[in-house]
Image (cartoon, rainbow, N blue to C red):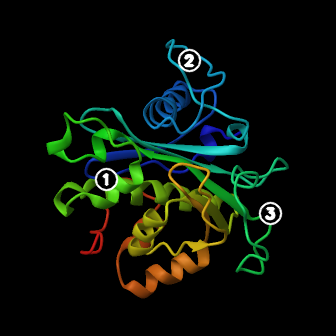
Amino acid sequence: MNTDQTKVPSMETVYFRFEEVVLGTPAYELYLEFRYEVFCKELQRIVPFSCPLSSNGRFMETDQYDPHSRHFMAYHKSTGISAASARVILPNSSGLNVTPRYVIYRPLPYLDATDANIGEISRMAIAPEFRRRQEDKDKPFQGDPEPEMIYQPEKNRRRQPELVLGIYREIYLLCQQENIKYCMAAMDNRFSRLLNTLGFPFVPVGPVNDNVQPPRRVYLISAFEMERSLSQRGTQILSFLQAQNTNDTPPSPPSNI
């Protein structure tokens, strides 16, 4: 189990605060409540067979991979509300969440990628308040965070790359701490293109699974290839990801985001 002594350093940007939440803490319960609201109640992507209640009397979404994971939250600074979540499933004897649900091509494109150094990014979500257009605030939610992040006009998406970069900074520092060289993630093809535009070279390692909604496939990212990709772009994103101090200013995303 992770402790406060080994937590990834927290960070603040202009609008958001990012921090790791530790199992057994009030912040962890709020994080699981957030997951329930997004994945079970709004998106209905996860069927809550038996959702436990938090100490606040609210439903929480959790699974068998949580004890083998590290967990992150982003909070909107001016209001304190939850803005985004993500977890990284660490290498463990039970395997990764994508393994029983997706076809994964073997061998993997990186020869040194093994079960011992591959994690999984999952339960990544953006709160509705930070992925919808202002003019759509009274309309029903469209559901999936990923397409909504992609299709909004640039002026309405400025904070979304900030959220994504902040979450991925926490994930990057965690992977360094845990000596994880690769991460898998199941995602929509369009969201993978958004991440590739930001400089995160996710490589598809399996076919699209049409039995999940929205249809997704498994991608693999190499920490080394990501560092090389970002360094070649001449942007400040790599420096932002590697910064250990707080109150960092996120770099401007590419103009075509």
Q: Position of residue 108 (x, y in %)?
A: 74, 76
Residue that carries the numbered disc 2 in the rendered image: 54
Q: Is residue 205 left or right of residue 82?
A: right
The quarter of the picture where residue 119 lies is: bottom right
List the single residue furthest toward the right. 93
14 lies left or right of 134: right
Question: What amino acid does circle 2 point to?
Answer: Ser
Residues packed near mark 2 inside 10 Å, few (<14), some (14 to 19) or many (20 plus)? some
Q: Which residue is mark 1?
A: 13
Q: Give the secondary structure at mark 3.
A: loop
Horizontal side, residue 91 vs residue 256: left or right: right
Tell me how far mark 2 sits from mark 1, CA to CA: 29 Å
Residue at 48% from the left image edge and 82% from the top image edge: 229
Counting residues from the start of the chain, the first of labels 3 and 2 encountered is 2
Q: Are marks 3 and 2 in contact (CB under 8 Å)?
A: no
Q: Residue at x 33, y 61 (%)?
A: 150
Mark nearest the camera among 1 and 3 is 3
Label 1 sits on a secondary structure element that is loop
Q: Amino acid at mark 1?
A: Thr
Q: Which residue is mark 3?
A: 115
Residue 248 visible, this angle: no
**Earlier along the polypeptide chain: callout 2 or callout 1?**
1
Residue 69 is left or right of residue 126, and the answer is: right
Residue type (three-letter) at the residue carrying disc 3: Asp
Cα separation, mark 1 vs mark 3, equals 34 Å
Residue in the image at 52% along x and 44% along y:
72
